[in-house]
Amino acid sequence: MAKGARTRATILRVAAETASLGGVARLNLQPLADRVGMTKSGLYAHFGSKQALQLATLEYATELFQAIVVAPAKTEAAGLPRLAGIYERWLGWPANAGLPGQCPFLAAAVEFDEGEGPLRERLTRLFRDFRGVIEQLAASAVRHGHLPASTDAAQFAHELLALRYAHQWAAGFMRDPAALERARAGFARLASRAPPQRP
Amino acid sequence: MAKGARTRATILRVAAETASLGGVARLNLQPLADRVGMTKSGLYAHFGSKQALQLATLEYATELFQAIVVAPAKTEAAGLPRLAGIYERWLGWPANAGLPGQCPFLAAAVEFDEGEGPLRERLTRLFRDFRGVIEQLAASAVRHGHLPASTDAAQFAHELLALRYAHQWAAGFMRDPAALERARAGFARLASRAPPQRP
């Protein structure tokens, strides 16, 4: 990797760590430059604007998310096992990515609740794409007979996201020691739409 | 009401509206003073500090929440009807309170995810108290035979909060026209733990 690319990667790594703690919206050039050990103008040379840096940080976090949460599904059995695997990795992904805080996407969804702009647009697209992945997995679980034919895949995806959101709240904000147990029990109940398995 | 109390009430009203749009953490004295049409020092005379203003805004929002979401439950049939009523009013409470944005408590839970302090402490207590209310209602629904005896009231409360959180995300951030329908379908599924009703 050329020096410029290495420096850029270092900046994005630190930016993602910072975003996991304080959100993408509050990602400012000067504090980040201080953390990376660069001048603000040096950082500016890499990204050109605060917004470009924030967008690049989202892309970096998306690549981490894909690698940690989604990619391993390829080797899992199709249907419910794959869905369960993705959910389990989704719960723990910030820690497994070495991020010190919480899921930066969920925090960003609150930050960019209002207004318009390219960051909000990018974020809603990320969420729609991932919700689409969950919907397809739920539909596949139906085809494999792991979920009843009456399952509404979009509703299933919505409720899975609800459980993940509540996990962030319970683990991060409430610091509830039962958070992970609740997240898993919620999934078990959601998946118990499953008809009895024939041996 | 004395003039001082009226002015204080006006400030808190505008502060709650502002918090529903941008969060409690970003509630600053100067922009609020501009919106109310006062000087910053005039505002300061009422609250003494930014943190005191933020805490007072939380208390004000809590009173609104109690009046709009919780109080009407008194006249509802005990058990599941009361639970369903609280949930329905909880979904729509910011609009019913005349707040232009989203639930300021849910936004604040993201803002105060990290760190410590009186605001975080007050917020977690508010959430614990309300979760306790939901748990009691779920337990009462069990006693009335509206939910099966095997219902874990704490898990039920967790999942209801998950649905409310996901509603904020779907309605506010994703601007999903199906958000309310999803929130209601989620409740119906959660409550369908109910055993078949005997006539």
Image (cartoon, coloured by chain):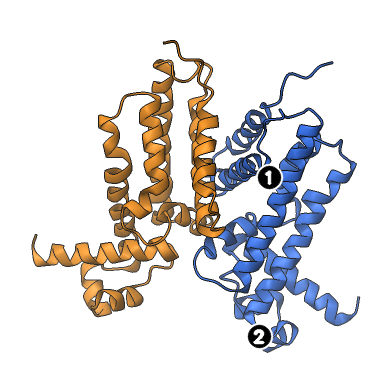
Chain colours: A orange, B blue
User: Which amino acid, mark 2?
Assistant: Lys
Q: Residue B18: x percent and y percent? A: 64, 66
Where residue A162 sits: x, y (%)?
A: 53, 41
Amino acid on which the number 1 mark rests in the picture? Leu
- Residue corresponding to mark 2: B40
* In the foreground, B113 or B29: B113
Q: Are marks 2 and 1 in contact (CB under 8 Å)?
A: no
Between the residue at mark 2 and the residue at mark 1, the CA separation in whole angstroms equals 35 Å
* In the rendered image, the vertical position of residue A138 relative to residue B89, given as above or below: above
Residue at 72% x, 87% y: name it: B42
Residue A158 visible to an observer of this rendering = no
Q: Secondary structure at mark 1?
A: helix
Residue displayed at 42% across by 54% down:
A103
Residue beneath disc 1: B91
Q: Quadrant of the N terminus of chain B?
A: bottom right
Left or right: residue B199 compared with residue B167: right
Q: Position of residue A148 (x, y in %)?
A: 50, 17
Quarter of the picture containing the C terminus of chain B is: top right
Crowd rating for badge 1 (residues with CA inside 10 Å; few <14, some 14–19, many 20+): many
Q: Residue at x 38, y 62 (%)?
A: A19
Residue A89 appearing in the image: yes
